[in-house]
Image (tube, grey):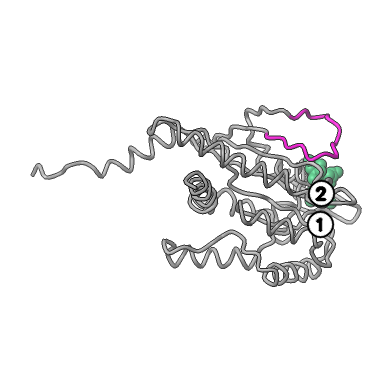
Amino acid sequence: ANAYVGFDTITQQIEHKLLKRGFQFNVIVVGQTGLGKSTLINTIFASHLIDSKGRKEADEPVRQTTEIHPVSHVITENGVRLRLNIVDTPGYGDQINNENCWDPIVKYIKDQHSAYLRKELTAMRDRHIQDTRIHCCLFFINPTGHSLRPIDIIVMKKLSEVVNVVPVIAKADSLTLEERDAFKQKIRAELQYHNIRLYPFDTDENDEEEIELNESIRNMIPFAVVGSERNVIIDGKAVRGRKNRWGVVNVEDEKHCEFVYLRNFLTRTHLQDLIETTAQIHYEAFRSKQLLALKE
Ligand code: GDP
Ligand code: MG
């Protein structure tokens, strides 16, 4: 009768510990000035931001340098605490000569890996390490409807080697639905042609359902999104939207754009996997290279 050992409570123990600690999620946004990066981030998270601090001043003038700003927020939903770091990369691809404009971004990502490795090597084993490693890179594509710029291809390739890259078509309300779908197909073909392997990756651990979900994500990428920091009234209800002379774009309406798919993907289906993939694939690649170099 007394055979019950009780180790099955470990799931509750883990959950309790994790919930108390909260989760750290770090996102970097990359793309030309004016493509709606800040707006989209605010559309996804802003209504939940209860506490923000960072080096960025709201009315700072737009910089033409590639100075990189991390801003941290804390979001709480149903007792779960998410610590969110948003890293803005102003000015990427704005210059006439964009040669090596991705260097500071790649360096920033590697610097976080390097900082983590240093702490890992010195910290006491059971101490929690502050994690600033970038879990997701939102890459903003100009909604030209034609094709990717050569620089976008180069930069996505460089970034995909160090971080989970998630491409989005910015300001998708400027394309018709036909243009949008043709553009998406074109971009997927270009990514394939240039052998750019983007997140999500399938692993042996994935079950059938996860493989299917990842396949559907790959068929949807890049997400064609619209952002708005304002509410508009539709059928008497306030929704995130953009009003122009012809009508209203409801950001959260799947018939209008793919914002909801991106948000579901980022926060509801792949948040944990983005974090794990960063540790197990990107950080691990960095770490083994560094440790190998140390031995030589
Ligand atoms: P950032 O420089 O990439 O951070 O761009 P901002 O978020 O500051 O947005 C630049 C301008 O584009 C602002 O006037 C926004 O209101 C506008 N904007 C942002 N998102 C969208 C969008 O999805 N569609 C349209 N049409 N305009 C947008
Ligand atoms: Mg901005």
Q: Are marks 2 and 1 in contact (CB under 8 Å)?
A: yes
Q: Residue at x 68, y 56 (%)?
A: 158
Q: Position of residue 130 (x, y in %)?
A: 52, 33
Q: Residue at x 8, y 44 (%)?
A: 1
* Image disc number at residue 32: 2
Q: Secondary structure at mark 1?
A: loop
* Residue 233 or residue 74, whichever sits in front: 74
- Would residue 242 be visible to someone looking at this image? no
The image quadrant that residue 249 belongs to is bottom right
Compared to residue 60, the image places residue 188 above or below, namely below
Compared to residue 214, the image places residue 189 above or below, namely below
Q: Secondary structure at mark 2?
A: loop
Q: Position of residue 100 (x, y in %)?
A: 78, 50
View extreme (front): residue: 296
- Inspect the magenta stretch and tell me whether residue 69 lies in it: yes
Horizontal arrangement in the rendering, residue 15 relative to residue 72 (left or right): left
Residue stretch in magenta: 56-70
N-terminal-most mark, 2 or 1: 2
Q: Amino acid at mark 2?
A: Gln
Spatial CA distance of label 2 from label 1 is 8 Å
- Which residue, given by chain and number where applicable, does mark 1 sit on? 142
Whether label 2 lies within 8 Å of ligand 1 gets the answer yes
Horizontal arrangement in the rendering, residue 291 relative to residue 189 (left or right): left
Q: Residue at x 79, y 58 (%)?
A: 151
Q: Position of residue 196 (x, y in %)?
A: 65, 64
Compared to residue 226, the image places residue 147 above or below, namely below
* Image disc number at residue 77: none
* Residue 129 or residue 241, whichever sits in front: 129
The image quadrant that residue 257 belongs to is bottom right
Q: Amino acid at mark 1?
A: Asn
- Would residue 66 be visible to someone looking at this image? yes
